[in-house]
Amino acid sequence: MTEALPDPRPTKGEETRRKILDTALELFKERGYEETTMRAISEKAEVAVGNAYYYFRSKEHLIQGFYAASHEDHLRASADALAVERDLKKRLRAVLLAKIETSQPYHRFAGILFKSAADPNSPLSPFSPESSPVRQACTELFARVLSESKVKVPKDLADELPNLLWLYQMGIILFWIHDSSPGARRSRLLVEHTVDIVARLITLASAPLLAPVRKRIVKLLLDLRERADEVVKA
Amino acid sequence: MTEALPDPRPTKGEETRRKILDTALELFKERGYEETTMRAISEKAEVAVGNAYYYFRSKEHLIQGFYAASHEDHLRASADALAVERDLKKRLRAVLLAKIETSQPYHRFAGILFKSAADPNSPLSPFSPESSPVRQACTELFARVLSESKVKVPKDLADELPNLLWLYQMGIILFWIHDSSPGARRSRLLVEHTVDIVARLITLASAPLLAPVRKRIVKLLLDLRERADEVVKA
DNA sequence: GTCTATAACCGGATAGAC
DNA sequence: GTCTATCCGGTTATAGAC
C-alpha cells in the first residue's frame, strides 16, 4: 500500500552513509582535507574503515558528496530571490552571490575541489560522467534563472545558455578559490561587474534582429561540445 | 680569476640533480605520472630515494622542470610568426596555436600538471610565488605579441593586457586538456573563433573615444588583483 | 546487503647515521 | 650528499557477524 512511494524513510544504509559524509565534511572544514585521515573520519563516525570504503570508493569520492550538499545549500539560498525577482540581471546576481556565500565556509577546502576538477581523468571532474547528476542539477538552476525572468530567449539559445551560465559560474568559483580577500570581497566585485555584461549580452543575443549572429554562435557551441562517438571516427 | 663567471662548470650536485630530473621526466612521459614511483625514479637514476628528496622537495616539484622546458618550446615555435607578422589577430592566433601544437605530445601528462595548477596552495599553481619566473616569462611573450603589432594600445591598458592574454591562454589550455578530439581539432576551433573577438575588443578598447570606459575597466582589473597587504588590513 | 575488526600493502615523505 | 630504515596514511584483503 505504502510501497509505491519513493522511499520516505531512510534506510539503515542511507543513514550510515549520511553519517560518514557529514563527519567527513565536518572534519574537512575543521582541519582541512589533507590533514583529515580516513581513519579519523571512521573513528569519529563510529564505523570501521572498511565500512567507509563500502560507501565511498575513495577519499576523493567523499568530495562528490560535498558537491551535492553544496548544491542543496545553494538552492536553498537562492530560492527567495528567484521566487520574487523577475529581472534577469538581478536573478543572476542573486544566484552567483548565493553560491559564494554558501561556499565561503569551505573556502580552505575548496582548493582541493578544483585540483580534481582540472584533471579530465578524475571521476571528480565536473565534466566526468560520474559528476553528471550534480552538473545537471546545477545547470537546471540556471535554466530556472532564465525561464522565469522577463527576458524572452529563443529556443536554440535557451537550450545552450544554462550550460554557458554554469561555465560562467565555474569561472567565478575558480577566481574565488584563489581569492583570499576578507569576505571574498574581490569575488563579489567580479560578480557585480560581470553580471551586468552577461545579462546585457543575453538580452542582446535574443533580439530577433541578431538571429544570424546567434545561429552562428549556437552552431559553434555545438561544434565545441565533446561527442562520445568522436574517438571512433578517428 | 675565473670566479666571477656565473658557473660555467656544473657541480657534482648539479649533475646529480639533472640526472634525477631527466630520469623522472622520461619515466613520466613513458608510463604516466601516477604510475611512476619515486622509488623507480631513484633506482633508474641510480641514487637513493632520500637523495632524490634532497634535490626535490616532493614528487610534484619534479614537474616544475617541465613547465620551463614547455615554455622554451613555445617560444621557439612562436618566433617565426612573431618576426614576420604585424597584424594583432594573426600574431595572437599564431602564438595560441603554437602553444597547442607544442603541448600536444604531452596531452596525457598535462592533466596532472593542471591538477596541481588549480590548487591555490600548491607551489605549482601558476599564481604561486614559486611559479612567478615562468609566469613572468609567459606574460612577456604576450607583451611582445602586443608591442610589435600595428595596434597602438594606451599605456594603462598595455600594462594590464599581457596578464589578461595569459589568462586567456590558460582558458584555452584548460579547454584543451579536456579535449580529446583528434589533433585537438576542437581546441583549434575555439582559438580560431575567439581570437577574432579578442583582437577586436583590444582594438576597440584602444580607441581614444572609449577612454572613460577603458579607465573603468583598468581600475576594475587593479581592484581585482590580489594584494599582499590585504590580509593585514582585515 | 550491511557491518566490524584487524592486518597488510604500497608509495610518498622523513630521520638520522655515515 | 648520500644512504638505509622508518613513518604515515590511502587503500585493500580477509574473515567473520547480523
Image (tube, coloured by chain):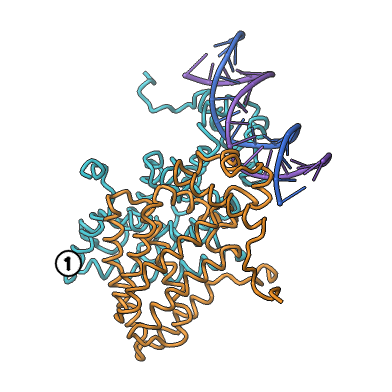
Chain colours: A cyan, B orange, C purple, D blue
Query: Residue B201 location in percent, x, y?
Result: 33, 77
Whether residue B150 sits left or right of residue A27 in the image: it is left
Q: Residue under mark 1: which chain is it in?
A: A
Q: Which of the pair B4/A78 is nearer the observer?
A: B4
Where residue A209 sits in the image (x, y, percent)? 16, 71
Res. B2 image quadrant? bottom right
Question: In the figure, A79 relative to B4: above or below?
Answer: above
- In this rendering, does residue A89 appear at all? yes
- Mark 1: which secondary structure? helix
Q: Which residue is mark 1?
A: A211
Q: Amino acid at mark 1?
A: Ala
Q: Quadrant of the C terminus of chain B?
A: bottom right
Q: Residues within 10 Å of mark 1 (few under 14, many from 20)?
A: few
**Measured from the top left, where is residue A57 in percent x and y?**
50, 31
Direction from residue B78 to residue A115 in the image, left or right = right
Residue occupying the point 59% across, 49% down: B20
Residue A75 visible to the viewer: no
| Percent x, y of residue B204 | 32, 82
User: Is B103 on the left-hand or right-hand side of D15?
Assistant: left
Q: Residue at x 34, y 67 (%)?
A: A199
Counting the numbered discs, the total is: 1
Q: Of B81 and B188, which appears nearest the observer?
A: B81
Left or right relative to B17: residue D3:
right
| Above-or-below relation of A178 to B49 | below
Q: Is residue B214 above or below residue B190?
A: below
